[in-house]
Image: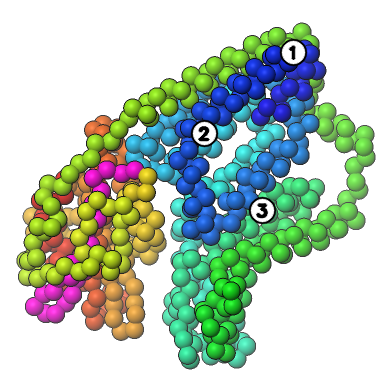
């Protein structure tokens, strides 16, 4: 932001080196305050990009800075019009989101708060004209946030089915027999599963994050920009189909490793194919535009720049500009400092269990349990303070696996819902279970199939005796309890059943329903 200010102010008032140094110190202080407030999200974002194969996360900030630097001269010529009330309002909103993120362990809100803080500071210190000019660089920063994980979650399952179907069609077309069973492609020698991470959705986001600025930088017509973006997305989708075919051919001919030599056929293959065709398409559309659209003359370019930047501030307004800037800076410092002090003194109070889960009864109704190694649990809560994993059997031989993960408080690295539990919601439906007391609870019902064995996972969240199926309601409940009572304790409960039966039944099996009916009252005696 510093290089956007001095040129205009020097033109209008011939600022002294002392005042220029003062601006640098003020901006440095603001930068330190923002860094201190958002140090956690800035530290965890790179780890998320690596773990989720989000290559664009590392590229987007660099591309955004390049876009700002490329237009630095035009930005420096814009009138400096600090907007106190709108800018302070957006900055306060960012502070509220950050507070809710901290107290409720809702880290997506923390990332959104960072974006709002940038918007608020630009609007407060520079004004709406600068905000409009910087809308693309700031908007691109949204691609580096994990909010896209939740936005695209409903798309994973349809894309898994589409990718599996098209992969099977292409394999049959080239003469390799393949049968399709939902997301499974059954080959003569191996069965391939188009897993959630192989749906290709995340990599389409990677391609789109680069396509938007590339289209803006290289093309002049909106038609060409839209065509480039849509073609890049289409190539990414088709590239994922081709990846499935290449994996099948590689495994058919005895290749070692499912994803080919040096793992070149992993999901990032889609992003790289998209990038290659994206830059090739940009070059191609540029050639078409040069032939169809005349290049603007230097005079017309100057007129466009003058129209965009507006008139330069008059010298007599220089003192007013500095006063407005200084007032806006004071407001920003007050808001950020107040928020920093509150968050520093805000502390969560851990809530212990009512009774230790070690004493959890091995006999629940007609079910007899045996403790299993916790590392064998199919789903676990990261950072859980207490965990329980047992296998229960009834007299009919039905086996039920019970997992309970409890957090006495939530914080960095330990939260409910988390990435593991969120992924379960993709294939889950809601199921109502009526307890013996007449109370009816709603839980999540997720089913998977392997051969002739039907696997069913019933899971829910629990806090203060309330059973919650929806992860967003659980997060809102955590925020409310933290603000009102200073507590963020929560538990995740999963009941997994493996039995012979009809895989397509829409109702939970009687065995699992019976176990849940007996389990819930027992759990309430242990979980606060």
Tag 3 and tag 2, C-beta contact below 8 Å: no
Which numbered marker is on residue 518?
A: none
Q: Position of residue 515 (x, y in %)?
A: 14, 66
- The picture places residue 217, in percent across and down from the top left corner, at 76, 47
Disc 3 to disc 1: CB gap under 8 Å: no
Structural crowding at the residue carrying mark 1, measured as other residues with C-alpha within 10 Å and reported as few (<14), some (14–19) or many (≥20): few
Give the labeled residue for mark 3: 210
Sequence-wise first label, 3 or 2: 2
Q: Which residue is pictured at 57% across the width and 19% down the height?
A: 329
Please state, as top left, top right, bottom left or bottom right, where the N terminus lies in the image: top right
Q: Nearer the viewer, residue 331 or 414?
A: 414
Range of residues picked out in magenta: 390-411
Which residue, given by chain and number where applicable, does mark 1 sit on?
A: 16
Pointer 2: what residue?
Answer: 35
Real-space CA distance between mark 3 and mark 1, rounded to the nearest whole angstrom: 41 Å
Contact flag, marks 2 and 1 (Cβ < 8 Å): no
Q: Is residue 241 magenta?
A: no
Nearer to me, 153 or 140: 140
Residue 294 drawn at (x, y percent): 91, 48
Q: Secondary structure at mark 3?
A: helix
Which image quarter is the C terminus in? top left
> What is the quadrant of residue 106 in the picture?
top left
Q: Is residue 438 visible?
A: no
The tag earlier along the polypeptide, 3 or 1, is 1
């Amino acid at each position: 932001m510093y290089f956007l200010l001095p040129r205009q102010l020097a033109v209008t008032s011939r600022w002294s080196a002392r005042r220029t140094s003062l601006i640098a110190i003020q901006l440095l202080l603001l930068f330190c305050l923002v860094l201190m407030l958002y140090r956690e999200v800035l530290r965890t974002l790179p780890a998320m990009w690596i773990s989720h194969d989000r290559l664009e996360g590392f590229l987007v900030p660099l591309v955004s800075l390049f876009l700002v630097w490329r237009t630095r001269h035009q930005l420096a010529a814009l009138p400096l019009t600090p907007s106190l009330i709108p800018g302070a309002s957006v900055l306060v909103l960012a502070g509220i989101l950050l507070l809710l993120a901290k107290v409720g362990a809702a880290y997506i809100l923390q990332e959104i708060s960072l974006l709002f803080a940038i918007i608020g500071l630009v609007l407060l210190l520079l004004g709406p004209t600068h905000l409009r000019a910087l809308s693309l660089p700031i908007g691109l920063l949204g691609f580096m946030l994990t909010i896209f994980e939740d936005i695209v979650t409903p798309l994973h399952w349809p894309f898994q089915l589409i990718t599996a179907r098209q992969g099977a069609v292409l394999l049959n077309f080239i003469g390799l027999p393949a049968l399709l069973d939902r997301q499974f492609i059954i080959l003569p020698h191996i069965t391939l599963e188009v897993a959630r991470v192989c749906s290709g959705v995340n990599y389409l986001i990677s391609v789109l994050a680069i396509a938007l600025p590339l289209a803006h930088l290289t093309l002049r017509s909106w038609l060409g920009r839209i065509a480039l973006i849509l073609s890049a997305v289409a190539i990414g989708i088709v590239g994922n189909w081709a990846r499935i075919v290449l994996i099948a051919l590689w495994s058919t001919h005895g290749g070692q490793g499912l994803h080919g030599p040096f793992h070149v056929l992993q999901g990032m293959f889609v992003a790289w194919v998209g990038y290659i065709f994206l830059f090739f398409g940009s070059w191609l559309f540029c050639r078409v535009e040069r032939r169809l659209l005349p290049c603007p003359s230097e005079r017309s370019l100057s007129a466009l720049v003058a129209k965009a930047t507006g008139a330069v501030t008059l010298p007599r307004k220089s003192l007013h500009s500095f006063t407005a800037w200084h007032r806006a800076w004071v407001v920003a410092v007050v808001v950020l400092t107040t928020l920093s002090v509150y968050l520093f003194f805000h502390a969560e109070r851990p809530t212990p269990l009512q009774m230790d889960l070690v004493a959890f009864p091995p006999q629940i109704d007609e079910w007899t349990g045996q403790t299993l190694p916790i590392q064998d649990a199919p789903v676990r809560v990261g950072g859980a303070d207490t965990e329980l994993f047992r296998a229960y059997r009834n007299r009919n031989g039905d086996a039920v696996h019970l997992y309970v993960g409890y957090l006495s408080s939530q914080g960095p690295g330990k939260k409910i819902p988390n990435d593991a539990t969120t992924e379960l919601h993709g294939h889950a439906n809601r199921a109502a279970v009526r307890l013996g007391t007449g109370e009816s609870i709603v839980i999540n019902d997720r089913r998977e199939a392997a051969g002739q064995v039907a696997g069913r996972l019933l899971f829910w969240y629990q806090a203060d005796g309330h059973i919650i199926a929806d992860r967003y309601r659980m997060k809102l409940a955590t925020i409310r309890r933290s603000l009102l009572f200073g507590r963020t304790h929560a538990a995740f409960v999963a009941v997994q059943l493996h039995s012979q039966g009809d895989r397509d039944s829409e109702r939970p099996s009687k065995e699992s329903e019976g176990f849940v009916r007996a389990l819930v009252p027992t759990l309430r005696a242990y979980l606060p």
